[in-house]
Image (cartoon, grey):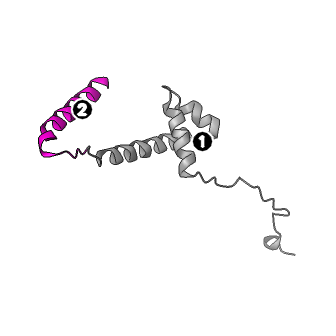
């Protein structure tokens, strides 16, 4: 037998590296909200769920972008009779000023 026909591999082992996990949107949101609950919880939350820190940061950015996009689309509307329009507008302005002061 020629040396070039002899195979150096006598045994081939297949090692399973694990299955790629699929996270539902609800699971992602729950994990992101948990990481946002206190400062500096990104790394600890990522370790708890077996995620990389960078993946959790990516989820947090996507969550923040979706949240600001959905909040920007809604405007408070007031339906009132003719005489009550000015008082409804004034109460709307005072409510907006009050909510701004609380932030």
x and y percent of residue 33 in the render? 51, 37
Relative to 71, say whether 91 is above or below.
above
Which structural element holds mark 1?
loop
The residue indicated by pointer 1 is 51
Badge number at residue 96: 2
Relative height, residue 21 to residue 11 (above, below): above
Judge left or right: residue 58 versus residue 11.
left
Residue 2 percent location from the top left of the image: 83, 74
Q: Please report the residue visible at 44 percent of the width from the left and 44 percent of the height from the top.
A: 63
Crowding near pointer 2: few (<14 within 10 Å), some, many (20+)?
few
Please tell me in which quadrant of the rendered image residue 46 appears.
Answer: top right
Report, in whole angstroms, how far the alpha carbon at label 1 lies from the one at label 2: 40 Å
Q: Nearer the viewer, residue 45 or 89?
A: 89
**Side of 103 where 9 appears, left or right:** right
Q: Are marks 1 and 2 in contact (CB under 8 Å)?
A: no
Of residues 52 and 26, the one nearer the viewer is 26
Residue 44 magenta-drawn? no
Whole-percent x, y for residue 94 in the image: 21, 29
Residue 71 sits in which quadrant? top left
Element assignment for label 2: helix
What range is drawn magenta here?
Answer: 77-103
The N terminus sits in image quarter: bottom right
Q: Position of residue 54 (x, y in %)?
A: 51, 41
Looking at the image, which residue is at 12% across and 41% down? 83
In the rendered structure, find residue 19 and report the number of the disc placed on it.
none
Earlier along the polypeptide chain: callout 1 or callout 2?
1
Q: Looking at the figure, which quarter contains the C terminus? A: top left
């Amino acid at each position: 037998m020629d040396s070039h026909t002899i195979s150096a591999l006598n045994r081939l082992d297949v090692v399973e590296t694990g299955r790629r996990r699929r996270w539902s949107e609800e699971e992602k949101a729950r994990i992101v909200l948990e990481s946002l609950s206190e400062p500096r919880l990104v790394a600890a939350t990522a370790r708890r769920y077996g995620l990389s820190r960078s993946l959790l940061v990516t989820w947090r950015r996507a969550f923040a972008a979706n949240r600001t996009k959905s909040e920007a689309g809604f405007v408070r509307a007031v339906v009132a009779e003719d005489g009550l329009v000015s008082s409804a507008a004034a109460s709307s302005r005072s409510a907006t000023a009050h909510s701004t002061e609380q932030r």
